[in-house]
Amino acid sequence: MEKAAAIIRKYKKAIMLFSSFIIMAAAAVSLSVAGELYLHDPRSASGEDVISIGGRDLLNMSNLTPPERELYRTLSQNGGVVTDKLISSMCDNRHWDEFILKKDESVESAAAKYHITAEDLLRINGIDRRIKREGDLVIYVPRDREHMDETSFFVKEMKRREAEFLRQKKLVSVTAYIVEEGDTLWSIAERFDLGADTIIGSNSPEKINSLLQGTVLRIPDREGIFVKVSEGESVERISSLYGTKRDQIYAANGIDIGSPLSSAREVFLPGANYASVIQTESGMIKIASGREYLLRNTLMWPVRGRVSSLFGWRSRSYASAGSFHSGLDIMAPYGRAIVSAMDGVVVYSGWMGGYGKTVVIDHTDGITTLYGHCSDLAVQKGDQVYSGQLISYVGSTGRSTGNHLHFEVRKNSFPVDPLSALR
């Protein structure tokens, strides 16, 4: 849909000048449709899909790409008239539809109605068939199999936000996880639907860097980090320093408002990012610059595009931001090739929570790179890759507002400003 919207924007003025028939001819030329375009009798027994524009049957849809088909379908439904409202509607990144599953309707009948398997419908919507439904239920159905993971993430994200809201006034809960063979930081984060920085910020660097089988990790029930309180420290200063909310710190740790913090006590900071602030061995705290490790001219650019968001705090004042960006966002067209920034081994390839479709590559000397929000992946876990090799394509999957690459660089699990490492 994004491609189709871009096409319409580009040719809107020209399209508006022509009749419905000329609209389709101009669009066909501009799109460089592969294959021969020909008039087709809709009553033909071939069963091919023909779209009618302004009362004229023009195109054989089997020759078109999915974005081109969306363009023609939309123009047909709108009578060939291009409006700002139409363009806006085509920019909707959702690839699923919302339906109501009636209390007396079975999952199997709903699945058949929406052309999806019952197992997929249950998985995507997080429905446990063993639990009796008390009433009607809102369900989400992907428009095609390609967007199943994306739809599932949307449902999980809604439920996560609801649960997070309810947890804000509750004590933090911790689960002990025993590292298994083949585990990586990224696979563990995905297993618990948490960010990698939460896993890192809740455990010692020694445990995270080795991840030896049998190691016990501390997994909190929400995003955030654990920090040790320095002498004379207060909740007000800590919340300001890490950009998190004071009332949530009080609630998560069972601290009475206004009570002093005892030195060396460990507290949980909901929503904080461990990479934003560095706590030294002496107890001193300083703001992370992203340049604690010097990796100058080490990596090649993973995609051609425009930098839209830098590494670091996303507002003027880190004290009130509450949002630390541990990577670099590079805007680029949907489907543009993304390449490996350095030789290495793929340690993760798949869906990773808010990152969407993601590739993580392990390089030498403790360096890893992450490529998030991809539309499609071209490598698998275990693949050896070389610098400049195609690994994925630009997209907007996961927690994203538009087509771009979220690119992270880490040294011994600690985020590094990618601009300091790119050549």
Image (tube, rainbow, N blue to C red):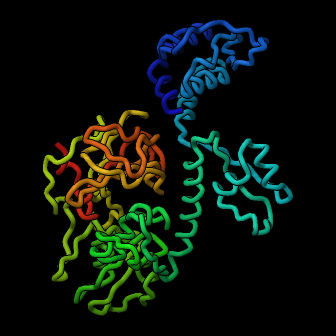
Asked whether residue 311 appears in the rendered view, the answer is yes
Question: Which part of the image, by quadrant, shows the N terminus?
Answer: top right
**Residue 403 visible, this angle:** no
Residue at coordinates 57% horizontally, 41% vertically from top-left?
A: 146
Residue drawn at (43%, 53%) of the image: 355
Judge by depth and name the residue closer to the eye, 343 or 335.
Answer: 343
Q: Is residue 243 left or right of residue 250?
A: left
Q: x%, y% of residue 41?
A: 74, 8
Point 31% across, 39% down: residue: 339
Question: Is the residue 146 above or below the residue 42 in the image?
Answer: below
- On screen, residue 303 versus residue 186, left or right, reads left
Residue 377: x and y, percent? Answer: 44, 42
- The quadrant of the rendering that contains the C terminus is top left
Marker count (numbered): 0
Q: Which is nearer the eye, 206 or 248?
A: 206
Q: Residue at x 48, y 14 (%)?
A: 32
User: Residue 319 appears in which quarter of the rendering?
Assistant: bottom left
Q: Position of residue 147 (x, y in %)?
A: 57, 43
Farthest-out residue, right: 104
Q: Quadrant of residue 362?
A: bottom left
325 in relation to 177, above or below? above
* 73 to 117, vertically: above or below: above
